[in-house]
Structure formats: C-alpha cells, structure tokens
Amino acid sequence: MSPEPDRAAWTLHDFDGDPVTRYLARKSFLYLLTFFVAVTIDWAIPRLMPGNPIDGLISRIQADPTASEELHGYFTESFGLDQPLWQQYLNFWRGLLHGDLGPSIAYVGSRVSELIWAALPYTLALLVPAIVLSYIAGNRVGAMAARRKVLDNTALPVAYILTATPYVWLALVLAYFLAFKWGIFPVSGAYDFSIQPSWTWEFAKSFLAHWFLPFLTLFLVSFGGWAIGMRNLIIYELESEYTNYLQSLGAPSKLVRKYAYGNAVLPQMSGLALALGAVVGGALVTEIVFGYPGIGTLIITALQNRDYFLMQGLFLFIIVGVLIANFVVDILYVIVDPRTRAGIQGS
Amino acid sequence: MAAAGQQADLLATPEVALTGEGATGEGGAPRGARSELLHFAIRNPKLVIGLSVVLAFLTLAIVGPWLTDATPFEFGYPLGEPPSKEHWLGTTSPGQDVYAQFVYGLRSSFIVGALAAAVAAVLGMAIGFVSGYLGGVVDEVLSMLTNIVLVIPTLAVLIIVSAYLSVGSLFSEAMLIGLTSWPWAARAIRAQTFSLGSRDFVSLARLSGQGTVKVIVREIAPNMSSYLFLTFILLFGGSVLTAATLDFLGLGPSQVMSLGLMMNNAVSNAALQLGMWWWFIPPGVGITAIVGGLYVMNVGLDEVFNPRLRRT
C-alpha cells in the first residue's frame, strides 16, 4: 500500500477523532447496550416465568425463620412486589449499582457478591492460562499442519475429535484415569484440605496438582478448535492472489507463509471473542466434575438449592466478565490489525 | 458445550460457493453439475467417514431400543455390574440397564440437535437474509440485535432460563437452545447475502419488480443452498453439545433419558470413585462421535461444493 492514500485516510478522519478511539467507542457502546439488555433479562425472567418462583421463595422463607428477616428486607427493598413495575426495575438497577446482589439462600448469612468474589480467582486461574495457551499452541500446530501433509493427516483428526468432545466428558475421563485409577493427580478442591493457603512450596505444589487436570480439560478442547481454524485459514490464504503474486516474484516460501499467517491471525482473533462464551461454559462444568471451588461450583450449588439471588448474580457476573474479555480482545485486535488504525473498517 | 463460537471457524470458505454457478439461479444445479458433485462426494474420504459415523449412530438410535426389553428408567436389574451377555453395557448402581439408557439417550441427542438446529437455522436465515439484502437501517438494527445475542454467553442464559422454567420436554429444550444459538449463523448468512445481492441476476430480478421475499427465496437462497446446508450441520453439532451440558447440569427434561443425564447420574452416584467406567464412557463416546462425525462431514461437503478446496 502506498503511503499517500494512508495519509489521506488519516487526515480525512481526523475531524471525527482518532479512528482507534472511534472503533473502541463503537464497541463500548455495543457492550454497554448488551449489559443493559442482560440486566433487563435478569430482572424480567423471575417476573415473567410461570409458577411465580417469588411466591415459592416467600413460602420457603416462612418455613425457615433464620433466613426470614434478612430476606424479607431484601424483598421489600429490591423486589418490592407491591410497587409498580417501573419502580421495581429502577430499584433493581439501584441495588445493582451499589454492588448489592442480595443475600444468598444456599449459604445463609453470606452476600451473593462476597461468594462470587471468593470463587472468582479460582475460575480465572483455570480460564486465563487455558485460553491463552490453547490459542497460541492451536494456531502454531494448525499453521504447521497446513503445510505438512503428515502432520495434517495425524494432528487434524485428533483436533476434530477434541473439538467435538463435550468438556464434561473429557473432564470425567481425565479424572477417572489420571486421578481415581492411576492416582497421579489428586481430585476435589483446589488444594489439599490438610494445608492452609499460604506462600509456601508445599501449598504451591498442592495447588498446581489440583489445578492441572481441570486446566488440561479446557486446554485440550479449545486447542482442537484453534488448530482446525488456523489450518483452514492458512490454506485459504496460500491460494489467494497475493500469494500467487509473491510466489511468481520468487519470494522465499518462508516469507509467503509469514504473510499468510499474519492475515490468518485476524479472523482467528475475532473467533477468540466469539469462543469466550463457550470456554466459560466449559470451565463451569469442568469445575463441577473436579469439585474445583470456582464459579461453576457456585452455579451447581445455586441450582440445587434453588438460590435464585445467587443464580441471578452469577448470570450478571459471567456476562460482565465476558464483556470485559471481549473488550480486551478488541484492543488486541487494534494492535494487530493495521486497518483499524488506518480508519478502514475491517470485517 | 464446546466451541459454539468456534463453529464459524469450521466453515472454511469465506466466500460462497455457488451451487451450479452459471445456471439461471432458479432451478438449482443442472444435471451435469449434480452428477459431478456426486462424483466428488463418493471420492471424498472426509465426507464418507463423517457421514458413515453419523449414520451408524443414527441407525443405533433408531434400531437400538428395539433390541432390548429394558427401558431407561426401569429398576430391578443387578446392581452396578460390568458389561455382560445379558446387559451389553452393564448396569448402574441403582440397577438400571446402561445399554437401554444409551440408545434412548442417542435418540434424544438426535431429536434435540435436529430441532434446535432447525429453529436456529430459520432464525439465522430470516435475520441474515433480510439484514444482508435490505441493508440500511434494517441492517443496522438487526446487526445490533445479532451482536448483542452473540456476545451474551449462551450457557449463562440457558442456565438461568431453564432454572426458572424447569424444562419438561425435549421440544422445549430444543427451542431454548435454538433461540440462543442463531447469531453466528445470521452473521455468516448476512455476509453471504450481502455479496450475492450485488450480482447481476439479483439486480435483474429486483428490476423486474419482484418483491423482497420472492428475490430472497427464489434467487438468493437457492444460490447459497450448499452454504446453508453446511451451516445447518454445524448448528446441529453445536446443539448436541449444548444439550449435553444442560442435561449434565440437570437442567434438561428429567423424564426423558439423555446422554448428558447419564453423565449427571454417574457423577452423583460416584461412578468415578467406584470405577464403573461403563456408566460414563458410552454417553461421551456417543456425543463425540456424532458431533465429530458431523464436523468432519461438513469439511468433506465443503470440499465437494467448493472446487477451490478440492486440492487438499
């Protein structure tokens, strides 16, 4: 690309502000709107569903005097069922913006927000390394498979099997063989119950041993998807016009592959944003299988105890988490894709 | 639930492969092109392998229940026995027949997968076609809607909705999954419609005074039928995985046996600790085989439809 049109694009859009800012502002608007929709869904679902779960809750509270007083206060304050709907809706937002997600029913005496904050580090400890490492490794292997027939014929079928495997089942199989049958890894909890969390080698070892299998589950399933995506994209790029042109100029194949990789990374990165929700879902069920004390374990507790406040809090929390992660990916995308910087909208 | 978002990646062709390009676009492919497709189809190992696996499990789902007298929820068999001549896949610890649960579970997987994929495909097509063909404000609004539903994690919505709704049948489970899994399909179809919309034959139809619906149904849809079919297959696979996750969490119908429910029962009855592998291995093998078969078949079909990919 010659420098002239580039500079023209910059000056043209300078009046509307920096294109990167505009791009991120548009994305932020979308995420704020999504958050608004999510909060509305969260508010509306208990009120729309047949069988009125709130009535059920009130009758349960009456049966359980310990929880009664605290919950009663929350009802009049946040649910306020005698008030008009718009007032209930505003109250819901007010509570939310104060960081108040209500009391937990399953864990009497705890606030929903406290429970979630306590579980969050464990889920992040699984998710972040699994997402980052599987993305890197999957892209590498996929790119290699695209140009080596032997690898293509061996790694690709494995990748297809992995991406078709339910997270739950892979977790079950790994737990059964590596933990219960052969006893290589411990299972249940995030560390040995006999030791206290502390900055010691003993604790770190115990933590890593408990962490590894759930991490491996998430890593393997996501890895398959990335490898397949990258392999297909590279093959497509290697057949495009610019590749033919480069090859006809006699460019070394290493250079051609470098360009193909650079172009293939962009759709993969958009894919990363799309895949986040699925990986989060996978992490939740994986935690349940391994008894790992993160968000997923909270969800199953909430479901089993019909703890609606906890469920609604978790729902909002997961969505906010995914929105933030999406925003991070958007920022990375700006760094990787020169077109967004030049003010030309990428696909 | 694996990779609902990565499904879009599995569609290798960023550009639409016109079914029978050069034809008028009205009656689909001419006879010559059709037999050519068949020629490549039976010689494509990916398509043949994927399709065989899917058909084998479909056959098992249809025929399997006839081969046993046991029903999935029936008690009274030996407690927790490994596979034997009487019980091909063993029994559960409360004394149910695992084979019966497995084959009825396979049925549920196919039913939910097909129904959910159909719902999602109809929604995705309606929104994608209209959005891509009309453009302008309609496109802005529909794209915004698509992006919002796309970014909300499906599983979170499904968990909260099914917790309040208490899903009672495969049909309502499929509806729920279909209603949340259409966005990537809508986005992909919108992009394809957008590129097809500027072709001459579409402009001609528009100039001759045909209405929007008629142009979409008669000109655009037939010309991307292969792409739509591939989208349906991916939606099918994704729905089977999502259903398995919901059933495992105990959020599916409790009166109907499913592969996810089998895993749920196995975990809550400590099958892992007791070493009863025959209880939780088969359901996962079933799901992985169906979904993997669908994905591999999808790649094979893609190569058959799109001559540019046949080289590989």
Image: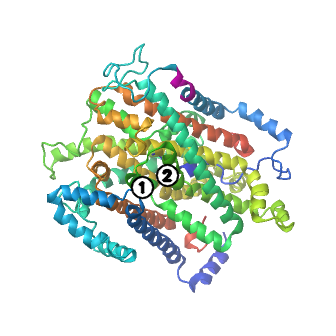
Residue at 41% in and 62% down: A45
Amino acid at dot 1: Val
Residue at 60% in and 42% down: A147
Q: Which mark is residue A100?
A: none
Residue at mark 1 shares a chain with residue at mark 2: yes
Expressed as whole percent of the image width and height from the top left, the position of residue A309 reads 29, 61
Rendered position, B61 above or below A59: above
Expressed as whole percent of the image width and height from the top left, the position of residue B1 reads 45, 46
Which quadrant is home to the N terminus of chain A? bottom right
Task: Tell me which chain the residue with mark 1 is part of.
Answer: B
Expressed as whole percent of the image width and height from the top left, the position of residue A13 reads 59, 82
The residue at which mark 1 appears reads as: B161
Q: Which residues are magenta?
A: B61-66
Amino acid at dot 2: Leu
Nearest the viewer among B126 and A331 is B126
Q: Residue furthest top?
A: B85
The residue at which mark 2 appears reads as: B176
Q: Residue furthest bottom?
A: A15
Which quadrant is home to the C terminus of chain A? bottom right
**Distance CA(mark 1)–CA(mark 2):** 8 Å
Which type of secondary structure does the marked residue at label 2 adopt?
A: helix
Is residue A220 in view? no
Mark 2 closeness class: few <14, some 14–19, many ≥20 residues within 10 Å: many
Q: Mostly what secondary structure, the magenta segment?
A: helix
Rendered position, A141 above or below B147: above
Q: Is residue A208 left or right of residue A133?
A: left
Report the colour scheme: rainbow
Rendered position, A150 above or below A239: above
Q: Earlier in the sequence, mark 1 or mark 2?
A: 1
